[in-house]
Image: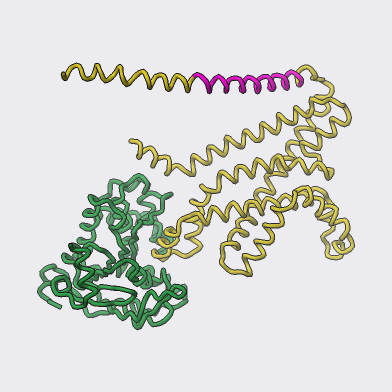
Chain colours: A green, B yellow
Amino acid sequence: MSIEAQEKKGMSVSDEVVVEMIDVNKWYGDFHVLRDINLTVYRGERIVICGPSGSGKSTLIRCINRLEEHQAGKIIVLGTELTEDIKKIEEIRREVGMVFQHFNLFPHLTVLENCTLAPIWVKRMPKKEAEEIAMHFLEKVRIPDQAHKYPGQLSGGQQQRVAIARSLCMNPQVMLFDEPTSALDPEMIKEVLDVMVDLAESGMTMLVVTHEMGFARQVANRVIFMDQGQIVEQNEPEEFFTNPKSDRTKLFLSQILH
Amino acid sequence: MKPSMPQRASPSSMPPAKAGTARQKGALPWLGRMFMGLWYLAGLGAAWIIISNFDADVFKRYGPRMLSGLLVTTQLVVLPLVMGAVIGLGLALMRLSGQRWLSLPANVYMTFFRGTPLLAQVFLIYYGAGQLRPWLQDVGLWGFFREAWYCVLLAFTLNTAAYQAEIYRVAIASVPKGQWEAADALGLPRRITFVRIILPQALITALRPLGNEVILMIKASAIASVVTILDLMGVTRLAFARTFDFSVYLWAAVLYLIIVETLRRLWTRLEARLTRHLGQQARAGKG
């Protein structure tokens, strides 16, 4: 991995392991979604995961916060192995933020309430403090003026930025993004990506499932290509895009980069 | 060319539009007015019967009793509805648990109470308890089942619980899966997710059918009069049996109507409050 490229972006990767997946396998009935996944994520890494639909990329990141169960192998997040133990799962989820394709904001709560709910009920934070933190992150995602509106009154891009702020309010150590711009109109994609770039530059560890190759080039330090439940290839972005090794990667890139 | 354009455009486009609206405005309201007229006539007829048959003696003797009957009816509706809501929510959660040993009994319960007449259920408990008297006395429950009042309360509660369970089950299941996932991803415990996120959204869906259930309950409560309860219907039957004054039934109808209408209005307010975020959304969409 070129260290120069890292330093140019002002983002550094430490050697502390944050997420480790060892021989992870998962089935939906007979369908083998994840095959022998081995992945180590270091603190400060920005990993972009791409691949054709149905390749298991969303499933992979959803296993990291146990929205999906894996059937074989080990997943260790921040030193804790994911098992059936709900207490441990909830502990890990507090440290791992997630942003969804369809935002999944709580429609009956205001933007501010969306952001303060988890800090108040999970971290037992006083309401006033939670609101201050929420306003801080709403400013970071550039919509403090929408704090008292309901999600339904916002555009898709604004809603997704609220969703990012909502996650950040829990002060997570890792952020998972599951196709965060796929449900957005083209003119709104940029405002969301800009926020994600800011976040990357602040040193957040990020795993991003996306087809935004421009984003991958700009902020990723590693790009992972998945197909049929396997990690086919992974490399730093420059090398990945200009010199892909496997035929499947070449075919995929030729289809999306025209 | 240019100045003549709007002039030409307006006369050619306006008349057909006018003709269309005129036809719609002409035929339908006329029919509607005719039907409304029939209703007014029926209403006037009922009012005339009430006024012309007004008997101060009957009114003095049975008026207060009917009001106390109204109070009994209110109790017969409110108590079972509240207790039924608690049981119903529990049943709905059992159905949604995904555990067979929980969902199966709930399913059997709901099928039975929604599949048999309320009158039969009241008889089953009231007369059935009589049959089991020695056994009930042994376990110390006879004091409860001896009273028609408790039997009716029990039957109504069990019945509405089954209906409400189905309403809650559908409403909870209709909340998108993404809401659970977002809450899970934030590390929220399931109990808080349910109370703070799922239930408020499910209630919006549940409100309409729940309103129907309340109104049906009010009217079904008249069944209590069959097993000696002097609710509004019971008092009315008594009054009619003693006076043969047909207008007492109209008095009862008016009272039932007042309760239902009051509740309907209350419900509209409740719905406006629960859906306030959707209302603003619609307004924002328009603007």
Q: Is residue B101 left or right of residue B270?
A: right
In the displayed structure, would residue B200 be above or below residue B24? Answer: below
Q: Please tell me which residue is depicted at 64% across the width and 45% down the height of the picture.
A: B213
Q: Which of the 4 quarters of the picture holds residue A164?
A: bottom left
Q: Toward the viewer: A51 or A74?
A: A51
Q: Please tell me which residue is depicted at 23% across the width and 77% down the height of the picture.
A: A233
| Residue B2 position in % (x across, y down) | 16, 20
| Residue B197 position in % (x across, y down) | 46, 55
Q: Toward the viewer: A231 or A21?
A: A231
Q: Is residue A131 left or right of residue B177?
A: left
Q: Which of the 4 quarters of the picture holds residue A256?
A: bottom left
Q: Is residue B194 left or right of residue A11?
A: right
| Residue B214 position in % (x across, y down) | 64, 43
Q: Toward the viewer: B143 or A231?
A: A231
In the displayed structure, would residue A40 be above or below residue B260? Answer: below
The secondary structure that most of the magenta stretch takes on is: helix
Asked if the stretch drawn in magenta spans residue B27, the answer is yes
Asked if the stretch drawn in magenta spans residue A226, the answer is no
- Quarter the N terminus of chain B occupies: top left
Q: Is residue B240 at all visible to an observer of this figure?
A: yes
Q: Is residue B93 left or right of residue A57?
A: right
Q: Please tell me which residue is depicted at 71% across the width and 43% down the height of the picture.
A: B75
| Start-end of magenta stretch | B26-49
| Residue A150 position in % (x across, y down) | 37, 47
Q: Is residue B196 at all visible to an observer of this figure?
A: no
